[in-house]
């Protein structure tokens, strides 16, 4: 009878222990991915935008995604400060109100490629 109770306890407790280890492993992997994503996110905040000075002639051939007020006086300005969302496949260009400059916002594809190369 005692052996039967022990086997029943093992039958219920052992799977819980294995499940707990599996969950712990999943949590550790998720945290590792979050740290990698945080590194990429910081890279994007620092590297996604550039200010370009272009002639009227050249500006006529650019397809603009919109117009933004200049934050160029703030050296720490990011695409988030401009309220811009990064997109996967193409660089976005924005007219800067009252200026002959253009805000260039790199695509996620280019940012990922540059980030990967910078971490090698």
Image: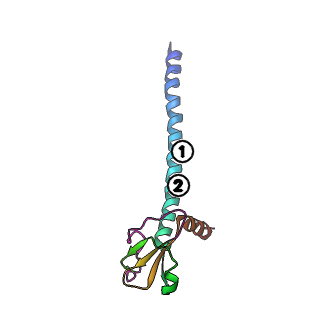
The reply to whether the magenta stretch includes residue 90 is yes
C-beta proximity under 8 Å, tags 2 and 1: no
Spatial CA distance of label 2 from label 1 is 12 Å
Q: Which mark, residue 25?
A: 1
Q: Residue at x 54, y 45 (%)?
A: 25
Q: In this view of the protein, which residue sits in the foreground, 89 or 8?
A: 89
Q: How many marks?
A: 2
Question: Where residue 51 appears, x then y in whole percent?
Answer: 47, 81
Question: Where residue 118 appears, x then y in whole percent?
Answer: 60, 70
Q: In this view of the protein, which residue sits in the foreground, 62 or 22?
A: 62
Q: Secondary structure at mark 1?
A: helix
Query: For mark 2, does the 10 Å Cα neighbourhood hold few (<14), some (14 to 19), or many (20 or more) residues?
Result: few
Q: Residue at x 50, y 50 (%)?
A: 30
Span shown in magenta = 72-91
Residue with the most extreme top position: 1
Mark positioned earlier in the residue sequence (2 or 1): 1
Question: Where residue 116 appears, x then y in whole percent?
Answer: 60, 66
Q: Secondary structure at mark 2?
A: helix
Secondary structure predominantly adopted by residues drawn in magenta = loop
Q: In this view of the protein, which residue sits in the foreground, 110 or 119?
A: 110
Q: Which mark, residue 33?
A: 2
The reply to whether the magenta stretch includes residue 12 is no
Query: For mark 1, does the 10 Å Cα neighbourhood hold few (<14), some (14 to 19), or many (20 or more) residues?
Result: few
Question: Where residue 84 appears, x then y in whole percent?
Answer: 41, 68
Is 31 drawn above or below residue 57 in the view shown?
above
Q: Which mark, residue 41?
A: none
Q: Residue at x 50, y 41 (%)?
A: 23
For the C terminus, the quadrant is: bottom right
| Residue 94, image quadrant | bottom left
Q: Nearer the viewer, mark 2 or mark 1?
A: 2
């Amino acid at each position: 009878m005692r052996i039967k109770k022990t086997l029943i306890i093992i039958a219920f407790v052992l799977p819980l222990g294995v499940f707990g280890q599996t969950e712990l492993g999943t949590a550790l992997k998720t945290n590792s991915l979050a740290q990698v994503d945080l590194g990429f996110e910081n890279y994007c905040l620092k590297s996604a935008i550039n200010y370009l000075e272009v002639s009227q002639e050249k500006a006529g051939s650019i397809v603009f995604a919109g117009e933004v007020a200049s934050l160029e006086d703030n050296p720490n300005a990011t695409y988030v400060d401009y309220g811009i969302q990064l997109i996967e496949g193409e660089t976005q260009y924005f007219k800067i109100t009252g200026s002959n400059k253009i805000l260039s916002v790199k695509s996620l594809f280019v940012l990922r490629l540059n980030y990967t190369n910078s971490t090698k």
